[in-house]
């Protein structure tokens, strides 16, 4: 007996119950989850009829009213997120009204700046943050009348937040460069933005030794579907240096099994091609074959719970952190695996140029940090202390006493 037939639904939503159940089944919902969702539909359908509301009036505001009512008598499925699968289905078939998120009203200058950020291919989160900084900075100010004193005053007011100050200053520089290039301000005010005082290249890239890599990979139970998924994702990061977002963006269409290559969707909407090592390919095939439920998604890595959609960057980053902690490594996450890939390539004799190509760095200076972990080559550059030339007695004579008496 079908699950949809075991749940009695009366009212305006009854005719959509069968299609909704088929949609959830295709997304991998279990019978128990499907039953709970259909019971929620029955409850919502009766509530709509009692208030004489049609399905085409099912807006987010109406859903919020239903949720508030349901919380008085139920403890489960009492949030807008619980109704989201039904609302998404009804919108997809053109029954419920579509609601587009209204963008905040911005000035003509900020709209031009927003288009500038989009054209540069920045991530949505970066665009949002930079627009917030621009709006705060320009509030009550005229772009054409800005001076270095305005920049200094604003930076001084924000300096009490040291954790976010570097990113905030970068966003401010971006705005000031745009104002100069667009002709909204004739002064190069970007030079008035100070830099956060810090020493560059003072720390070593955090990487894993070969034995630690084996321990991290061994934390994945490859007898399970999730274990195989996590193992394949970790291999992509630790062998080829992929970022968490690049692993999440990988699709079946990106892999060329005949040529042994795959496409990487990198930062700034860039793409590149990398060779597919045999062990990584075998891990991908193993996890793809282990999928128990059908899905229409072309993503290689899916969420572990229904609906089985593509994994997000946060999901891949979380599984990398979880594997490191399970291996007893208490610091670092997905980016530490990327550093490990670069370090391993360097130790096998790869040049910095070759490493930059694999990691898809835009500038070789970014790759130069890995030169510090090549201890063998660095020892060749180190010069011995010249005590055999001058002699120890001569060196002691050159040393001066600390002038305590002068103080």
Image (spheres, grey):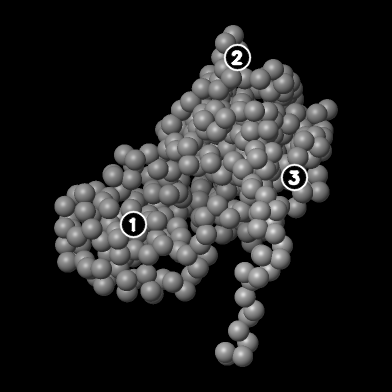
Asked if residue 116 lies left or right of residue 92, the reply is: left
User: In the image, what residue occupies the spot 45% across and 46% down?
Assistant: 58
Identify the residue position indicated by label 3 in the image.
324
| Mark closer to the chain start, 2 or 3 | 2
Looking at the image, residue 291 lies above or below residue 168: above
Spatial CA span between label 1 and label 3 = 36 Å
Q: Is mark 1 on a helix, strand or loop?
A: helix
Asked if residue 24 lies left or right of residue 3, the reply is: left
Identify the residue position indicated by label 1 in the image.
173
| Mark closer to the chain start, 1 or 2 | 1
Q: Are marks 1 and 3 in contact (CB under 8 Å)?
A: no
Q: Is mark 2 on a helix, strand or loop?
A: loop
Q: In which quarter of the image is the C terminus?
A: bottom right
Q: Give residue 141's position: percent from left, percent from top.
A: 23, 68
Residue 111 in view in this figure: no
User: In the image, what residue occupies the spot 67% across and 50% down?
Assistant: 384
Asked if residue 344 lies left or right of residue 166, the reply is: right
Asked if residue 350 lies left or right of residue 181, the reply is: right
Identify the residue position indicated by label 2 in the image.
260
Q: Camera-side residue: 184 or 42?
A: 184
User: In the image, what residue occupies the spot 21% across and 53% down?
Assistant: 180
Q: Do the residues labelled 2 and 3 touch (CB within 8 Å)?
A: no
Q: Is mark 3 on a helix, strand or loop?
A: helix
């Amino acid at each position: 007996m079908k699950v949809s037939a075991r749940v009695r639904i009366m009212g305006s939503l009854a005719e959509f119950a069968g299609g909704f159940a088929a949609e959830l089944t295709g997304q991998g919902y279990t019978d128990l989850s499907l039953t709970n969702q259909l019971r929620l539909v029955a409850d919502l359908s009766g509530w709509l009829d009692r208030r004489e509301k049609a399905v085409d009036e099912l807006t987010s505001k109406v859903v919020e009213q239903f949720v508030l009512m349901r919380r008085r008598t139920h403890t489960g499925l009492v949030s807008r997120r619980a109704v989201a699968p039904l609302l998404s289905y009804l919108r997809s078939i053109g029954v419920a009204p579509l609601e587009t998120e209204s963008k905040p009203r911005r000035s003509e200058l900020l709209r031009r700046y927003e288009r500038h950020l989009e054209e540069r291919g920045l991530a949505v989160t970066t665009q949002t943050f930079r627009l917030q900084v621009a709006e705060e900075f320009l509030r009550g100010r005229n772009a054409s009348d800005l001076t270095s004193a305005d920049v200094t005053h604003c930076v001084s007011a924000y300096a009490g937040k040291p954790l976010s100050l570097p990113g905030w200053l970068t966003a401010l520089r971006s705005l000031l460069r745009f104002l100069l290039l667009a002709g909204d301000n004739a002064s190069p005010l970007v030079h008035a933005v100070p830099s956060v005082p810090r020493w560059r290249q003072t720390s070593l890239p955090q990487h894993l030794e070969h034995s630690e890599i084996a321990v991290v990979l061994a934390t994945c139970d490859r007898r399970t579907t999730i274990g195989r998924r996590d193992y394949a994702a970790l291999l992509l990061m630790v062998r080829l240096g992929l970022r968490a977002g690049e692993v999440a963006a990988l699709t079946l269409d990106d892999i060329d099994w005949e040529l042994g290559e795959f496409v990487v969707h990198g930062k700034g909407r860039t793409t590149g091609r990398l060779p597919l090592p045999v062990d990584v390919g075998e891990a991908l095939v193993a996890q793809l074959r282990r999928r128990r439920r059908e899905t229409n998604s072309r993503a290689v890595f899916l969420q572990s719970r229904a609906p089985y959609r593509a994994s997000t960057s946060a999901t891949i980053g979380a599984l990398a952190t979880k594997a490191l902690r399970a291996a007893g490594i208490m610091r670092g996450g997905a980016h530490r695996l990327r550093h490990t890939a670069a370090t391993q390539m360097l130790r096998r004799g790869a040049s910095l140029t070759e490493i930059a190509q694999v990691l898809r760095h835009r500038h070789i200076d970014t790759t130069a940090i890995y030169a510090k972990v090549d201890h063998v080559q660095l020892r060749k550059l180190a010069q011995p202390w010249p005590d055999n030339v001058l002699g120890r007695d001569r060196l002691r004579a050159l040393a001066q006493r600390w002038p305590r008496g002068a103080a």
